[in-house]
Amino acid sequence: MRTVTYAEAIRETMSQAMRQDEDVFILGEDIGIYGGAFGVTNGMLEEFGPERVRITPISESAISGCAVGAAMTGMRPILEIQFSDFIMIALDNIVNQAAKTRYMYGGKSKVPLVVRLPGGSGAGFAAQHSQSLEAWMTHVPGLKVVQPSSAYDAKGLLLSAIKDDNPVLFYEHKLLYNVKDEVPEELYEIPLGKAEVKKQGTDITIVATSIMVQRAMEAAEQLEKIGVSVEIIDPRTLVPLDIETIIQSVKKTSRVLVVYEAVKRSGYGAEIASVIAESEAFDYLDAPIKRLGGVATPIPYNPTLEKAAVPQVEDIINECKKIMNL
């Protein structure tokens, strides 16, 4: 099978969806000739023209309002917000309008909106452009939240998000854009709310999200060399969350580490840990549930400090060793 990058998979999915459905269009800052902040929309203006590749002013409040209104009136917009941090400027439209409209109208109104959000650290963009704020959005009823960790998942999940009649926040990690994976050329869907067992294991479960799935896989390779068998679960979507897959894995291994890039305090990993603690998996545990998240500090510009602010492969290895009493 051919290999494509994470960015190419996202671009291909949007293009295929736009060819298939005239109601699908994209909008955002610099998404035309410039190709978006990370080049994901390169070439789309030439194919689809300015009516369906809408280059907007620098106003997240304005463009999110346009996107929500378009979705409510029958279109299927895909809104690119250059950096996920800037969603804060669009929160009234997303949280108070998009998330609540279908409920408030008794299901008579739909809001089929996808908001693409490049997030995470590691690219040297410093404190205001490197945050992981997905936990904020998971707290809002009416919003679906997706975090693909591979190009294959990005394509299948994005198509499902585009076809969904509810607003979906689609978090893309900046460091994953150039990571390649085997991806079919034809369209396919990965259901929202279905986790994946990325690696089978017997000694400890790592539940990891986004870029941390890649780092957990690297850590697992090193841990295998000292006889520790690691199972890795990627939730893929935070809302809805596939609780059953996580619980079954923890029941099998009896130990669990939840790894995420966001600040550890009040991060989404706390929700996953609580779900495990409140389930029948709790009685199977041979060690306390552990979380590994980012340091409670703004993301530094200095590359050494930036790396130290969020979990790395060695941190995952060391935490697993502690849980295993090694």
Image (cartoon, rainbow, N blue to C red):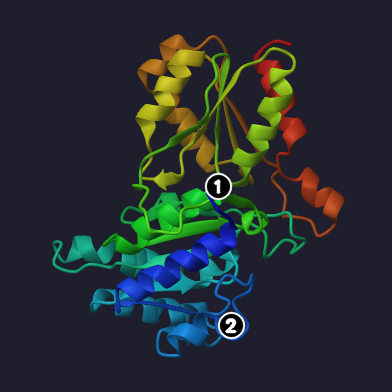
Q: Quick check: 151 left or right of 93?
A: right
Q: Quick check: 178 left or right of 309?
A: left
Q: Name the residue type under label 1.
A: Ser
**Front one among 2 and 162:** 2
Task: Give residue 313's position: percent from left, percent from top.
Answer: 73, 35
Can you say whether 175 is above or below 223 in the image? below
x 45%, y 73%: residue: 79
Q: Quadrant of residue 324?
A: top right
Residue 126 in sight in this render: yes
Quadrant where the C terminus sits is top right
Can you say whether 187 is above or below 253 in the image? below
Can you say whether 131 is above or below 96 in the image? above
Task: Give residue 49's position: percent from left, percent from top.
Answer: 45, 89
Can you say whether 49 is above or below 237 in the image? below
x 30%, y 67%: residue: 112
Task: Give residue 37's position: percent from left, percent from top.
Answer: 63, 74
**Front one among 260 and 224:** 224
Q: Name the residue type under label 2.
A: Asp
Labelled disc at residue 149: 1
Write down the residue under mark 2: 30
Q: Mark 1 Cα within 10 Å, few/some/many (few <14, many 20+)?
A: many
